Amino acid sequence: MTMSGPAAQAKSLREAFVGRFGESPSHTTRAPGRVNLLGEHIDYNDLPVLPMAIQREAKLVFRPRNDSIVRIHNLSAEFEDVEFEIRPGVAKSEAGHWANYCKAPADELARRFAIWRGFDAVIESTVPVASGLSSSSALVNAVGLTLAYLNEIETEPLPLAEVMAEAERYTGTRGGGMDQAISMAGRANCAAKISFAPLRITHLAIPNDWSFIIADTGVRAEKSGNRQATYNRRRQECEDALRAVGAAVVAAEMTHQPVDSYPALLAGIGVHAALALGEDVLDGHLARRFRHVMTEANRVREAADLLLSADLEGFGALMDASHGSLHSDYHVSSPELDELVGIAREGGAVGARLTGAGFGGCTVSLADRGAVDGVLEAMTSQYFEPRGLAADLDNHLFVAIPSAGAEINEL
Ligand code: GLA
């Protein structure tokens, strides 16, 4: 009998562990990547988002140690071994090095709790790197959950996800909390509406005949390089826009509550008044950034209802509008993302958009199950083949399976 898929992966991880450390691993941890369906670049403004966890995941097998050392061997030869000691203030590796995503949870957890127990592990991730599918948070969550479990501290998904969101800022990106939350707390067959401050999650079943197709442009969107600066700048622009609009709200006595967050702004004056005020008081790019945040928040609100009523066309139209806004107002698309979105629509998708931070990486397209082959064929023949890029189901192009969040199991 030959094994394939997860069973084969577990076996090769175990064999690699024995080869590397000379004994058997005792546990396994997995944490999935995610695809964001709607609500892009608004989690860091504390506005709700709508992602789902996918079948691509970071998986490790490990064995506890009796000291504070963590040693992680990556099954992929591309990534060198990592070794460090758990303590607050773990020294960083060079920017962009994968070790930083292993060190981040150790550093954060050690700052908050008296943790000391390390582990030996072999890890493999099937989440494509720097493609907008949250390979980084899958890694952070897998290592973070392992440490939390071994040191008998918080392992409830949402509280731990909040700590992991803070942890990932160790790598230099001022990210929001979406990726860590969905990777920790996702549910099979469901998308999730996630709201922040406080962090909450509502699971929403995905209708059986809806298919989300993920296509990778092949253009890496490294969050640690140039894109990190652009990402952080977008966040700053949102803060600047809120400050200006908030001051105008107070000056006009439109609400008596403080407008110190985007949720407070929306609760105080509503999305339409906020949009109108933004046009009045903001100039140029700040007006555009603000418009994206407001319209995207509105789309998430509508999308949750459309999902519940299984309105495929309506949901697809919101994805198209989201892409338009990310392209024209938020300026985070790229020619390749725009091209794949166009091909998906012509090939029979009801809606398509970039997913994740943008600047390269992946698109997500929604199609009725019966239309999936047409979309895959259009993308293969018009985008992947002309570029000589493989488009089999392991590379660049696959149908997302809404998956369960992170877990740890004894072997
Ligand atoms: C990255 C960040 C998330 C989110 C998205 C954009 O994935 O990690 O917090 O901001 O970009 O929606």
Image: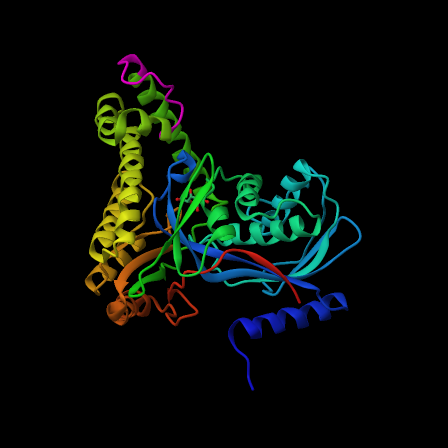
Color encoding of the figure: rainbow
> Quarter of the image containing the N terminus?
bottom right
Residue 121 counted in the magenta span: no
Who's the residue at 57% across and 71% down the image?
A: 9
225 relative position to 41: left or right: right
Residue 255: in magenta span = yes
Q: From the viewer's side, name the closer residue of 339 and 101.
A: 101
Q: Nearer the viewer, residue 237 or 302?
A: 302
**Residue 329 visible in the shown view:** yes
**Range of the magenta residues?**
250-262
Position in image of residue 389 (x %, y %): 37, 68
Q: Picture quarter containing residue 78?
A: bottom right
- Compared to residue 221, the image places residue 167 above or below, namely above
Residue 42: x, y in percent? 37, 39
Type of secondary structure dominating the magenta stretch? loop
Name the residue at 29% across, 34% down: 294
Quadrant of the rendered image holding ligand 1: top left
Return the residue nearer the eye: 63 or 324. 63
User: Considering only vertical position in the picture, is 42 above or below 184?
Assistant: above
